[in-house]
Amino acid sequence: MLRHNKQKYEIKLKEGYHKLSERYQLSENIRTAKQLIPCILMHFVCIILPGINSCLIYIHFYKDTFTFDFVNQCIFTIISVGSFLIELFMIM
């Protein structure tokens, strides 16, 4: 979407016949897309990690309880930090 808006903006800028409001809207779309990329990546990480962990639990990858508990606590910590970063990226 970011690439599409950039290409559209460049084409319209070269042609020189688009209105100010259209140019403003395209530049706003580009800026918003750039701002949302870190947030989307953090959402992806916070969704994928528990899924991978669930698959590993399902196939009995963890042999002892300590490893199981340790990995779960690490994943919970990563998700907590990731959730904070999502909020931080939205503010910035």
Image: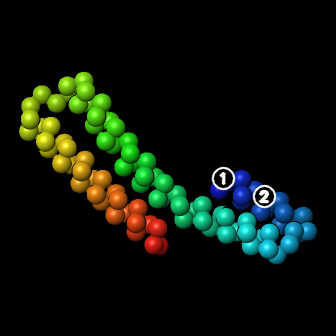
At horizontal 90% and vertical 64% (from top left) the residue drawn is 15
The picture quadrant where one finds residue 23 is: bottom right
Whether residue 79 sits left or right of residue 15 in the image: it is left
Q: Amino acid at mark 2?
A: Lys
Local packing at callout 1 (Cα closer than 10 Å; few below 14, some 14-19, many 20+) is few
Local packing at callout 2 (Cα closer than 10 Å; few below 14, some 14-19, many 20+) is few
Q: Tell me how the rendering is colored.
A: rainbow
Tell me the residue that label 2 is attached to.
Answer: 8
58 above or below 10?
above
The picture quadrant where one finds residue 58 is: top left
The residue lying toward the viewer, choosing from 27 and 91, is 91
Whether residue 88 sits left or right of residue 63 in the image: it is right
Tags 2 and 1 in contact by the CB under 8 Å rule?
Answer: no
Q: SS for tag 2?
A: helix
Percent x, y of residue 31: 62, 67
57 above or below 43?
above
19 above or below 67?
below
At horizontal 38% and vertical 45% (from top left) the residue drawn is 47
Q: Along the polypeptide, which appears first: circle 2 or circle 1? A: 1
Tell me the residue that label 1 is attached to.
Answer: 1
At horizontal 40% and vertical 66% (from top left) the residue drawn is 87
Q: Amino acid at mark 1?
A: Met
Q: SS for tag 1?
A: loop
Percent x, y of residue 38: 47, 59
Percent x, y of residue 51: 34, 37
